[in-house]
Structure formats: structure tokens, C-alpha cells
Image (cartoon, rainbow, N blue to C red):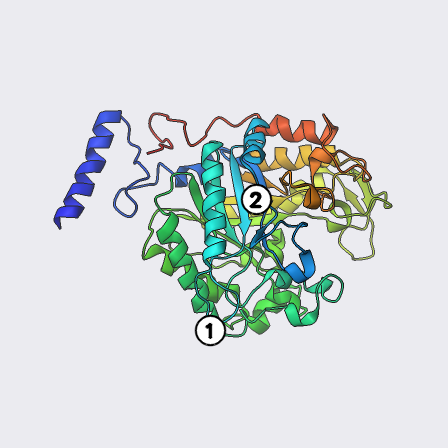
Amino acid sequence: MGGRQQFLVLFCVLILWSTGTHSIPYGVPGKCDSSFSKMSLWNTADGTHLRGANIIQMRVYPELDGTEFKGPGPVGPPFTQEDFDRLAGFGANYVNISHPGLFTESFPYVLDEGVQENLDRLLEMITRADLFAVITFRTGPGRNEFAIHPEEMGSWYPEHMLINTVWKSSSVQRAWAEMWQHTAQRYRDNPVVVGYDLMCEPNSNEYLDEWDPDEFYKSYGDTLHDWNQMYPLIVEAIREVDVQTPILVGGMAYSAVEWLPYLKIMPDQYTVYMFHQYAPIVYTHQNPSQNRSYPGEYDVDWDGISDQFNRSWMDSLLQTVDNFVAENNVPSAVNEFGVCRWVPGGSVYMRDSMDLFEARGLNHALWVWDPSWEPYASEIDSFNFRHGPNPNNHVDVSSSDLMDVIVYFWSRNTLRPSTKKSKKSVIRR
């Protein structure tokens, strides 16, 4: 054992002795046991620890966005310290940063300094707001923002702007691993960063037009289209430089619940297998002119047969998660969920959703916490609960039924980066 290693081990022992706890400080990545620090936040057996929201960050395309809609760039829409302070004031204790990857999306796949600086600024503000953070990459080598919205090609972006080669090239997939290794090396010592979410909603199945997981894996398993052969490369690259920060992995088909059981289980003990929950889309994403309610009776799964859509329906959906967790002895989480602010019964749907998550000890991140940047917030606000149930209102309201439910559950948070607890605790260095 070298002198530096001896020093780090001694440092761990001294911290344990001086605090009288069995917890390990964040500042010694790869050297001290972190099972009672960042990873303990994701332990479903101990109940829900993290309740918060997503923020969305996208590259600014001046030819599409101008210089005001998403801000001057290179990433937007802009967030301020007040935006994060308000989120904490509402009771949330973590932010899922849905962000562009730090490497360029086109060859030669190198570090984009402007994107990295944006993530640095966000983490500084999140730290000042005393919130935890998960870093999620929406884009990266061979995948840009438009690849997440292929069905909208020709409406708000032209075909030539789409970049989606990540599912066709092993070298591009290796570049994702290199990007994440750089990211982990940069942020591994940051005490508020409690997770790396490797790719926001893997979706090669959409381009292949295959929505049945059994059929997908029968035809495309172990090919470049298979996220199960790509994401382990990223995990291995991260663990070369950071052995303790939890890694979050969602399944194919935009991380839908039904695809969770098809995820390959890694031997890595600090991996969390998460999902996104917007089911049923016909309810959560309906237009203001539609009138599908919760609870209600209508076809929610496109089979031509009416369904009883209620709490029992959602509980049954989440049995898939229960079985997956029990069979594999792994933690899970809900890294995105939500409902358009105007849907009938939206507050009841939200109450039942969050209650069912918490009954399972699942951490959850709402979609979405929007910034105060007016050009963006006044136009893209379908999921902005702060704007109330009136689809024609585009400013914050003082209260609403949906807001009350969200704040009620967020008020249950007791942990923050500044919190110190004895025993199996989260300790800020």
C-alpha cells in the first residue's frame, strides 16, 4: 500500500472515530466504503429519501430558437439561483438535471467546454440551495435532442438536423463511455451529486418500430440496437474512476415500466434500475379539449377495450416493479413522472401516484420544474404545475389542487446535503 493510500485509509478511520458514526465522508472516492452514504439514499427498504423534480436543459439552436426563447446559449433555458431556492422552498430535496452530454454530438466527439460550464453553474446553484442532484444525459456522441422526438421531425425541426447514429456504431457507443468517464472523474467528489443517469430514455426500438419487448429482444438482442450491450460499457468506464457514486439505468422504450424487467443486471452493487411513469399516455398527455378523467373508464392501452382506470390499475402496473426488485434484489426509482396540469382529476392521479411510489420506498422526480425565464416558461408549460389548471394561464398561481398534493409529499423530506445523521447517514464533507 502506497503512502497516499495509507493516508486515505487513516483519514477514513479518523473521521469515523471523531464523528462516532459508521458513515464515510464523500471526499474519498474509491477508497472508503460508501454503502452508508450516497447509495443509502436509494435503498428502497428504508423508505423514500429523495423527492424532487426534473429540470430540462437543451442545446440552443439559434436557427430554430433565436436568442430569446431558450436564452443566448449554448444551453438553455437559463436557470437562476432563485429558481432552485424556490424549489427547495416548496419542499423538494433533489434535482434531476436532464442535460446535454459533455461531449459533442458530432465527430470527433470531444469535450464541449460551454456545455460543461453550464453544468458546473447549475451544480453550484443547486449546492447553494441545499439540494441533492442526479446528472442525466439526454444527448451525447451520435445522439442529439431531436433523437428523443423523432415523431416531431418536419414540424419544429428539419430532417437534416437529426443526429441518431448511436445505435449503429460501436465506436460511437464507446465515445459515450469515454464521455461518462470524464464526467465521473470531474464530479465524483461533489457531495451533492448522488447519481449518474446514463441516458435519458433509450429508444432505438422506436426507430425499429418494435414496441413489444419480447419481440425486440428476440430480433435485436446483443446487437448495437440493444441498450443492454451498451450501458455495461459505460458502467465499467465510470467505475475505473469512481467506484461509489450510484449509477441509474432505465430500460428501452423511453424507460417505460413494461421494459424494466428486460434490463440486464450488473454485478455493480451501486446501480439503481429506474423507470419513467407516464402511463397511460392517453390520460397524462391529453389536450385541454379532451376530457378523460381519473378515475375513469376508457381504453388506456390501445386494445380497443375500455378499462377501469383507477388506483388499482396503477398499483397493478407497478407490480412489475415489485417483481423486478424482489427477483433481482436491486433498488429502483422513478426518475420521471407527471401529468399535464389541466387534466381532469390530475391532483387525484398525482396523489395516488406519489402514494404508491412511497409505499414501495421509491425515490421520485416530478416532470418538471421550469425556470422563471419568461420566453420559455410562458410557452412550454404543459407540465408546469405552478401555472395552475387553466391552459390559458401562463404565469404562476398562488395555489391549486395539484400544487397542494405535490407540496404535501415534498414536505416529507428530511434529508438534505447539509444534514448529518448518526449511523447509516449521509454526511457532507
| Residue drawn where x is 81% and y is 47% of the image | 287
- The quarter holding residue 84 reads top right
**Which residue is under mark 2?**
334
Q: Nearer the viewer, mark 1 or mark 2?
A: 1
| Residue drawn where x is 64% and y is 68% of the image | 161
Does 162 sit left or right of 303 as displayed? left
Q: Position of residue 57 (x, y in %)?
A: 58, 50
**What amino acid does circle 1 point to?**
Ser
Instruction: Say if 79 sits above or below 213 in the image.
Output: above
Residue 46 seen by the camera = no
Q: Secondary structure at mark 1?
A: helix
- Give the alpha-carbon distance from disc 1 to disc 2, as whole Å: 29 Å
Instruction: Say if 144 sits above or below 297 in the image.
Output: below
Does 131 sit left or right of 408 as displayed? left
Instruction: Say if 224 sits above or below 326 in the image.
Output: below
Marks 1 and 2: CB-CB under 8 Å?
A: no
**Which residue is under mark 1?**
170
Q: Secondary structure at mark 2?
A: strand
